[in-house]
Image (cartoon, rainbow, N blue to C red):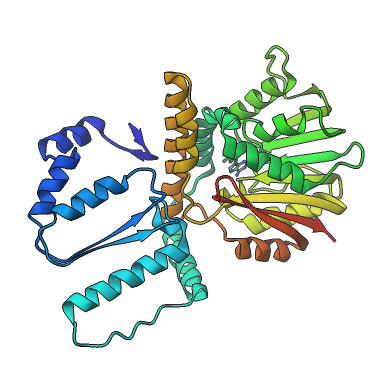
Amino acid sequence: MNVLGHSVKADHFLGNSIAFNFHNLQTTLEDSRSTQVPVHVIAGLRDTWVSLDAVKLALESISSECKTLYLLDQSMHRLEENPKDLSAAFQHLVEQTHRSLLPSVPLAFQSPSLREVVTQRRIEKDRMRLHMDKRTEDEREFWRSYLSDFTLIRQVEDYQQLASDVVEMIGPSAGPMILLDAGCGSGNLAFFFLSGRRPLSLYVGIDFVHDALLTAANTTKTLEPNNRLSGEAASGSYTFIQGNLDTPLPLRSGTADQIVCNLVLSYLNDPLDLLREFVRVLKPKGRMVISTLKPMADCSQIYRNFAEKARSHEQVDQARKLLNNAGGIAAKETHGLYRFFSQLEMEALIEASGAVPLSSRISFGNQAILIAAVKA
Ligand SMILES: C[S@@+](CC[C@H](N)C(=O)[O-])C[C@H]1O[C@@H](n2cnc3c(N)ncnc32)[C@H](O)[C@@H]1O
């Protein structure tokens, strides 16, 4: 069973939860009552998984004299999602632990600079990646399964916001033009671009998952499914091409007016190589909009908002699958297979590719960074 991207032996897991009594708050409270050591609890007020009332109850039951509750008003379940709060939480823990263990010794607290933290994180991720085997076939299968549930995301408000930010940042089209959607998946953005509002002479979607391209083509043309990857839509022609973005793009230099690459860059072997390819195929003054999840993103609130609006059991089930898929991506990030970028890192990458960053935005429920850039 897939639980937040991890394969869990459900019988074993649920059986043990009940056998060893960690399946309800009551047993947590009993454990708390027998806790004698100092306890410092940190809770995020935007945590979608654990309620503050439950945290307070557990803390009240702790019999230890020394206990504190430290609340982080902007934090979600994944503390790392918010580096500022994460650093404050660590500082709190160190101070409290020091106070209870060495009350008479003054604390000389020194925290590393953000630059040192980012560099160290990068070194550790690179080291982990050396031990991981990232094979194209496995990746393609991961995304095939992921994308089979991904068209539903079009109904998620935060995704709609992200898509409209991409469309807005790429700018108005000055007459018919060629737009490349790199890593188009099952055509979620094609849906926004080809629905008739902007004239296009050609929309080109590239992805390495063939099934997803068929879904994209079939929903785009709103004709009967006929397994063809090219056709006409309200605002222009379109074609979907199966291709691996870890290899050179199948387009001639200087042919594209605009390029969008939504939530894709972080999954490639060499993101900078792909950005350089974008610069190669863009016409002079051509624009691109690139988005990425931010490092240690927490998508739980996005999917929860969606699940709360779900009308049927089927929709709740699909929201759960979306969340499990997001968990699968987070697990790969933890193992160093995927790399998500901060705004500064994205800007540095874009500059290194030869393009000029124009503007940036935070979107997708505060979990994604978008950058618009131009080919000089
Ligand atoms: C999170 S999805 C985003 C899909 C789409 N851009 C959207 O907004 O719905 C990531 C996409 O990247 C594609 N992808 C990942 N690695 C790829 C590669 N090496 N070559 C081509 N596509 C790739 C996946 O197949 C998937 O469609």
The residue positioned farthest toward the left in the image shown: 34
Up/down of 89 relative to 77, above or below: below
> What x and y, as percent, mark residue 220?
71, 24
Is 319 left or right of 27, judged from the image as shown?
right
177 or 294: nearer the eye? Answer: 294
Q: Is residue 126 visible?
A: no
Is 69 left or right of 66, judged from the image as shown?
right
Q: To which quarter of the image does residue 75 belong?
A: bottom left
Quarter of the N terminus within the rendering: top left
Q: Is residue 117 visible?
A: yes
Is 151 left or right of 274, judged from the image as shown?
left
Quarter of the C terminus within the rendering: bottom right
133 or 277: nearer the eye? Answer: 277
> What x and y, as percent, mark residue 192?
72, 32
Q: To which quarter of the image does residue 342 belong?
A: bottom right
Residue positioned 76% across, 27% down in the render: 195
Residue positioned 42% across, 19% down in the render: 313
Q: To which quarter of the image does residue 10 belong?
A: top left
Q: How many marks?
A: 0
344 or 307: nearer the eye? Answer: 307
Residue positioned 50% across, 40% down in the render: 302
Up/down of 210 relative to 37, above or below: above
